[in-house]
Amino acid sequence: MSPILPSRSPALCADRAYWQETILHAVGFLVHSQRECARPLALIERLCPADTPTDGAAWRRIWLAGEVAGELGVARAGESPASAHTLACVRHRLAALVEAGRLQVGERVAVAAVLARLGDPRFPPRGLHLLVRYQGECEPALGLVRVRHGRLMLGSAADPDGALSNEVPGGVRLELDYAFWIGRYPVIVAQFRAFVAAGGYERRDWWPELGWAWCQGQRRR
């Protein structure tokens, strides 16, 4: 890895198909073969500056910063107060990228996987890995969103990037005679593990009648 790579990499990573993998291989060589962390940390700082990102290229550089941090390892990246602060900034920027829909859907899914490896600050382990913050604000319902009864539309009225062909135009219009709660995100493994550890499949009071009948049927198989 060249000594000037931390300064050149933000420009090089615009060609994602080639340079991003090259940069990550170089970082891996430094970390695992040379036992060096200084230049990977400097690269993370260059890719994720204090300025707010203004375009897709800047958000993709933050994505790369997260991948470099993952290659470096969370323990190494947080060894000093300065590097721990840098890692925290990367985590929060990646969370903002996912929440605000800055890139296309497939890219955001990949970014979310990087964020999970680094430790998503919105899902603290001490809170059973439930969502406690969303878009910079406290999340009072811990990641649940109430869907009101009445008319609603499934799908998209426009044609946003990443929408499937059966989601546009106009979506599907439905009318619900009941309200319900649904998670902002799919259930994660850590949340499901907490449910099982708490005896979730044995707690009758946690299940509606139909759900409990299903649960009992599954256990008898």
Image (tube, helix red, strand yellow):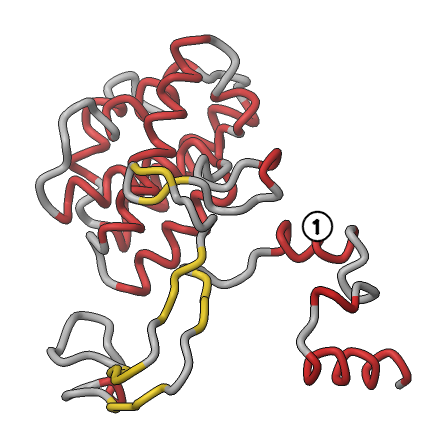
Task: Choose top left, top right, bottom left or bottom right for residue 174.
Answer: bottom left
Residue 186, horizontal then vertical, whole percent: 49, 63
Residue 83, horizontal then vertical, whole percent: 41, 15
Q: Which image quadrant: the N terminus?
A: top left
Q: Which residue is mark 1?
A: 194
Residue ID at (77%, 78%):
215
**Relative to 164, residue 108 above or below:** above
- Residues 109 and 20: in front is 109
Residue ID at (40%, 25%):
87
Q: Residue furthest right?
A: 220
Whether residue 128 sits left or right of residue 165 in the image: it is: right
**Label 1's element?**
helix
Whether residue 92 sits left or right of residue 213 in the image: it is: left
Residue ID at (15%, 72%):
160
- Residues 20 and 86: in front is 86
Task: Choose top left, top right, bottom left or bottom right for residue 106.
Answer: bottom left
Tally the marks.
1
Specify the amino acid type for callout 1.
Ala
**Relative to 191, residue 88 above or below:** above
Residue 126, horizontal then vertical, whole percent: 61, 33
- Residues 131 and 159: in front is 131
Q: Residues within 10 Å of mark 1 (few under 14, many from 20)?
A: few
- Residues 9 and 216: in front is 216
Task: Choose top left, top right, bottom left or bottom right for residue 175.
Answer: bottom left
Residue ID at (29%, 16%):
3
Residue 124, horizontal then vertical, whole percent: 54, 36
Q: Which image quadrant: the C terminus?
A: bottom right
